[in-house]
Amino acid sequence: MAGIVYWKLRSQLAFSTITFDGHFVSVGEAKRLIAGKMSLGPEAVEELVLTNPKTGQEHKEDRRLR
């Protein structure tokens, strides 16, 4: 089963999606998928910050996303 993460940059109005195999994806892998979809270089992966839009909590590298 493929999983989906909805994401957007602060400057964007609409959410985009990335898909991955399985039920979970690591924060690092989600950042790599987003950077790839946006055609950003590998240095951008470290600059991306993933946060929960409802709580504002930042997702750290050691966490998995569902």
Image: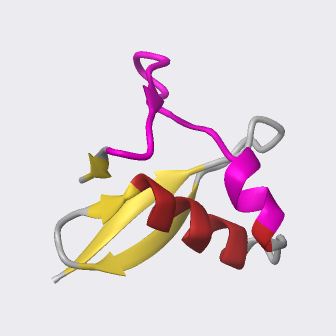
Q: Is residue 6 above or below residue 18?
A: above
Location of residue 39 by image quarter = bottom right
Q: Is residue 56 magenta?
A: yes
Q: Position of residue 48 (x, y in %)?
A: 69, 47
In this view, which residue lies farthest toward the top? 55
Q: Position of residue 19 (x, y in %)?
A: 41, 76
Q: Is residue 10 left or right of residue 26?
A: right
Q: Is residue 57 above or below residue 51?
A: above
Task: State the count of labels.
Answer: 0
The magenta stretch is 43-62
Q: Is residue 50 magenta?
A: yes
Identify the image's colour scheme: rainbow, by chain, secondary structure or one colour. Answer: secondary structure
Residue at the spot x=83%, y=39% of the render? Answer: 11
Image quadrant occupied by the N terminus = bottom left
Residue at the spot x=49%, y=59% of the render? Answer: 28
Q: Is residue 1 left or right of residue 58?
A: left
- Quick one: 48 or 1, which is closer to the camera? 48
- Quick one: 22 or 42, which is closer to the camera? 42
Q: Is residue 66 above or below residue 17?
A: above
Residue at the spot x=78%, y=44% of the render? Answer: 12
Q: Position of residue 6 (x, y in %)?
A: 47, 54
Residue at the spot x=36%, y=78% of the render? Answer: 20
- Quick one: 17 or 33, which is closer to the camera? 33
